[in-house]
Image (tube, coloured by chain):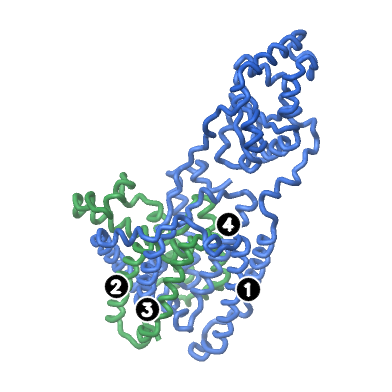
Chain colours: A green, B blue
Amino acid sequence: MKDPKKYMNPYYAGFLLGLVVIVSFYLTGRGLGASGAVKSGVVAVVEVVAPEHAAESEYYGPYLQEHKESPLKAWLVFLLGGVFIGGTVSGAYSNRLGIKIDHGPKIGTLLRVFTAIIGGILFGFGAQLGRGCTSGAALSGMSVLSSAGFVTMIAIFGTGFVVAYFFRKLWI
Amino acid sequence: MGPLVPFGIISPEFNYIVALFIGFGFGWVLEQAGFSTSRKLVGVFYGYDYVVLRVFFTAASTAAIGLVALDYLGAIDFNYLYINPTFLWPAIAGGAIMGVGFIIGGFCPGTSVVAAAVGKVDAWLFIIGSFLGIFIYGELFPMFKDFYMSGNYGPIFVYDSLGISRGLFVFLLTIVAIAAFVITDFLEKRVTYGIVPNHPKYGKTVPAIAVSAIAALIIMLLPAQEDQFANIKIEDSNKVKYVTTEQAAFDIYNSINSFQFIDLRSEEEYKEFCMTNAIRMTLKDVSMHKYSNYFTNKLKTPVLYSNEEEIALKAYLIAKDEGYANVAVLKGGINEFKEMIENPTKVQTAGFVGDYTQEFLTKFSIFIKSDTTLTKPRVKKIIEVKTVKVKGGC
């Protein structure tokens, strides 16, 4: 097993990420995003399992109206597909592939399982309410200098700093 | 000019392929930066790993500077970019919930996909959790709907909200970013090395940031875009395609309609007396994609005019710059046209309609004076190019 390569210089990585955002806006008029793709997945599942409920719902209904072909034929789904591939290729290239479960030194795997799921539930819920996550609302929003982008970013990171202390045992 | 999909230069179907490639770049960079590990991601909140701050702030600054620069250069039209609308209360509430989710879960949706891609089980669990979270939201949505729609300020810009210019804001943003980098560099040397002795060192703050700061400064100090047109001058008037006032008269009299007159004067002058069926545009409008259909219409040559020729010639240069081949300028401007109507026997272009020029122009003078609507604005609405609606967001 080869040693993993070093991580990229973060400023350089940030610069490249900024370029990716610029290219995205220049080519398509929109920035990056992620949570929307997960929503597409949820809508797709609900539609299969309970189609009438999906069609009637105030939440799933409009989405289905807009994506008549398939809930999964959405720009963000393709984007995230690319992210997955890009991540895998980068991981392979850097010898960082491997089934692992990361967690802080003071907690065990079982607790990590719970915190990962709960964190996901909170983030999924919050991203819908906040109309985006760190990639879509915050990063892309800040790139076009929207007020929403900055408000969302400050809300996410500000809250993070405030509550970090109370969950410190999870990480340090 | 970008953005290419809304302008139809890239088809909506191909857009999905574009998304795939952009996503690849996104995923690659995130993984290379170390965003496939939850422990690195929360490091900024505990002061042992500042990678998130460095990457995020640099990316946002780079993208903001880049997009503003492209806008200034006329390479991108901000009117067609997706600007996420501000719904203040749900943004704050949602952001706060996400903040807690970040600390507990150690991921955000994008990074969870990257981490899942390299095999991190906690990332897969986070994604499953996200599904559940969105499902719960979807089921409870009617409860939140009013709150979700509250505080709607529309797609407003942060610099407008703060009451400063865009260039100044971008500059300040860059300064704040650099300050954050310097402070965290310092904290890292003093504090982090104690906690994590093998923490990779990044030396100085990268020159790329300095370059960005200079770029931001330049952008801020650049003249406002209106002044851009002040220095446009015609080099060689022989190369300009002209339409004479006699040709215009002939076209109007016989209702040939092969000219689309474009008035570049003020609203008042336009309303008082204009060329037949003329539309009014500003110099900036000539460069905008949304009016391009007037310049690409093969059946109707756009004829630019102002009082004399000076402003029309500027518009002509702008149009040529945009790549429009079929453009003309009204020779002598509308003043010459008015002169021709008043004194039809003073022929400008000899032999235009042969020996009958003077006869024709006299007839024309009577004709055009007989119906005042011919020289008043008649066109109700300027037709804008239809663009693909910019979808966006999350």
Q: Nearer the viewer, mark 4 or mark 1?
A: 4
- Quarter of the image with the C terminus of chain B is bottom left
Q: Around disc 4, counting alpha carbons within 10 Å, would you say few (fewer than 14), some (14 to 19), or many (20 or more)?
A: many
Marks 1 and 3 in Cβ contact (< 8 Å): no
Looking at the picture, tell me which residue is in the foreground, B233 or A28: B233
Q: Residue at the spot x=57%, y=37% of the render? A: B291
| Residue B206 numbered tag | 1
Q: Position of residue A35 (x, y in %)?
A: 37, 62
Name the subunit of mark 2.
A
Separation of residues labelled 4 and 3 (CA atoms): 37 Å
Q: Earlier in the sequence, mark 4 or mark 1?
A: 4
The answer to whether tags 3 and 2 share a subunit is: yes
Q: Position of residue A2 (x, y in %)?
A: 46, 75
Tell me which corner region of the image, top left, top right, bottom left or bottom right, holds residue A168: bottom left
Residue B222's disc number = none
**Is there CB contact under 8 Å for labels 4 and 2?**
no
- Name the residue tied to disc 4: B67
Choose between B26 and B44: the one closer to the eye. Answer: B44
Please state which of the two labelled residues, at mark 4 or mark 3, is closer to the viewer.
Answer: 4
Q: Residue at x 70, y 19 (%)?
A: B247
Which amino acid does the dot numbered 1 rest on? Val
The secondary structure type at the circle numbered 3 is: loop
Q: x and y percent of residue B341 in the render?
A: 72, 19
Residue A5 visible in the picture: no
Q: Chain of mark 3?
A: A
CA gap, disc 4 and disc 2: 37 Å
Identify the residue under disc 2.
A117
Q: Seen in the image, is B207 located left or right of residue A172? A: right
Q: Which residue is mark 3?
A: A102
Give, as a three-letter code, the residue at label 4.
Leu
**Mark 1 or mark 3, which is nearer to you?**
1
